[in-house]
Amino acid sequence: MKKISYILLSLLLCISCEEVVHVDIPEGKPRLVIDASFEIYKHETPVTVDPTVKLTLSAPFFDSTIPAVSDATVFVTDINNNITYPFAESTEAGIFLPTTSFTPVIDTEYELTVIYKEETYTAIAKRIPAPKIDTIVQGDKILLDGDETEVIITFTDIPDQDDFYLFDFDMNLFLASEDRFYQGETFSFSYFYEDMEEDKDVTIKILGVNKQYYNYMNLVIDQSDADGGPFGTPPVLLRGNIINNTTADNYPLGYFSISETDRVPFTIKK
């Protein structure tokens, strides 16, 4: 395929700006936070899955302590085949894992159910494909401050369909991307880390996501940018795709997604 290369600053990149994602919650009634972003490492042998469900409660804006939720019932249902996969809390508080082998398959809907304090929360997701990362190399370009470190990521877009991706650059650094301008092409772009320490090891990932999750993550990234530090305006509550079937107004925070994922360990040199 023809290879096309762009720098992050290009308007055609169609990737959101670099931001650290730390979503703080304003004061008010604590809400259940459900982090259920499943990752399927399809390109590894053997194929492995990270099907972690993390349950916490939202904390006041200035509170650094995030309470874990343990007294909950969690399971995932294969809607197409009416199979239920129960989850149990691991040795880490608030972390729930399946009690049997569970690998989501393509073209199947899965429903996450969380029961907490006699209220039932649900969301539906499907496995979304993602390509391999072809290469990652360190570049020598900088941006404004001169303290940035460039990495150049190359991957080949899945052809003949509209794709949405989430790039995870470790340390809560994300970029959301759609393939509008590189449909079916081999594509390279630059990402810039700031103030990196010497010989820093990171894991860079590409996750396949649907349009709804792509839009959600762009809002998360934008909100993180608008936070403004400890004296900034408290962020609004970002609702994901999980609903409260018992009390609609007591909606949870967080998201349920199932992503094919490719991950590459990389050492950043100064």
Image: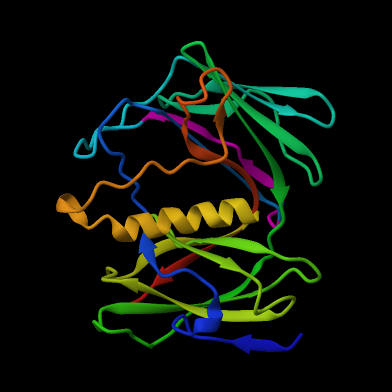
Residue 59 vertical placement versus 40 (above, below): above
Of the pair 187 and 25, the residue shown nearer to us: 25
On screen, residue 235 versus residue 104, left or right, reads left
Q: Quadrant of residue 134?
A: bottom right
Q: Residue furthest top?
A: 118
- Provide residue 104's location: percent of width, then percent of height: 73, 40
Quadrant containing the N terminus is bottom right
Q: Is residue 46 visible?
A: no
On screen, residue 20 versus residue 35, left or right, reads left
On screen, residue 144 versus residue 62, left or right, reads right
In reply to whether residue 77 is colored magenta, the answer given is no
Q: Residue at x 35, y 47 (%)?
A: 23
Q: Residue at x 30, y 44 (%)?
A: 24
Q: Residue furthest right?
A: 81
Of the pair 213 and 269, the residue shown nearer to us: 213
Residue 35 vertical placement versus 70 (above, below): below
Q: Residue at x 40, y 79 (%)?
A: 150
Q: Residue furthest left?
A: 231
- Provide residue 45's location: percent of width, then percent of height: 71, 53
Q: Is residue 1 visible?
A: yes
- Provide residue 193's location: percent of width, then percent of height: 35, 71
Of the pair 245 and 267, the residue shown nearer to us: 245
Q: Which residues are magenta?
A: 43-57
Q: Residue at x 40, y 63 (%)?
A: 201
Q: Quadrant of residue 243?
A: top right
Residue 222 vertical placement versus 182 (above, below): above
Q: What count of labels does the image hold?
A: 0
- Provide residue 25's location: percent of width, then percent of height: 31, 39
Protein image colouring: rainbow
On screen, residue 194 versus residue 190, left or right, reads left
Quadrant containing the C terminus is bottom left
